[in-house]
Image: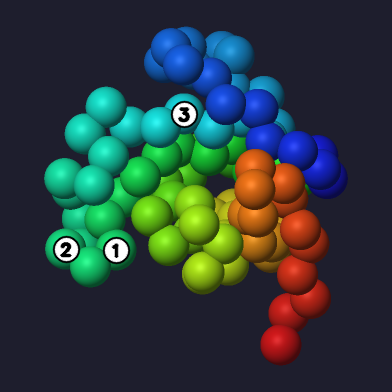
């Protein structure tokens, strides 16, 4: 698993390698009012793209990969990927 997130500033899907993160232009305006969508993250393990919320971006809520074949669970802390053991 990639240990550090790579923030990209331009939406170029082909540059979304594992661990890449792109902050949405309308971050905070869509999704749940208390925990809106914030960015698109490429899973640091398998590269599957998924939306993450503000709380996930701040490390409050763990990120679980959306791929059914990928077991990745991690917390984002200061743009570092901290693996998390399933409960
Ligand atoms: Zn994954």
Between the residue at mark 1 and the residue at mark 2, the CA separation in whole angstroms equals 6 Å
Quarter of the picture containing the C terminus is bottom right
**Left or right placement of residue 38 versus residue 59 in this view:** left
Of residue 31 and residue 60, the one placed in the foreground of this image is 60
Answer few, some or many: residues within 10 Å of disc 3's Cα (few below 14, many 20 plus, some between 14 and 19). Answer: many
| Residue under the point 35% across and 45% down | 38
Residue 22: assigned label:
3
Residue 53, percent from left and from top: 38, 55
| Residue under the point 46% across and 16% down | 9
| Residue under the point 53% across and 39% down | 41
Q: Secondary structure at mark 3?
A: strand
Residue 33: assigned label:
2
Residue closest to the far bottom: 87
**Contact (Cβ within 8 Å) of mark 1 with mark 2:** yes
Above or below residue 13? Residue 25 is below
**Left or right placement of residue 48 versus residue 57 in this view:** right
Residue 72, percent from left and from top: 72, 59
The residue beneath circle 1 is 35
Q: Secondary structure at mark 1?
A: loop
């Amino acid at each position: 698993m990639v240990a550090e997130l790579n923030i990209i500033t331009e939406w170029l899907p082909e540059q979304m390698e594992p661990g890449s993160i792109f902050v949405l232009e309308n971050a905070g305006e869509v999704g749940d009012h208390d925990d809106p969508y914030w960015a698109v993250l490429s899973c640091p393990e398998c590269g599957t793209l998924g939306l993450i919320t503000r709380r996930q971006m701040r490390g409050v809520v763990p990120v679980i990969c959306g791929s059914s074949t990928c077991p990745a669970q991690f917390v984002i802390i200061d743009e570092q990927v901290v693996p998390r053991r399933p409960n």
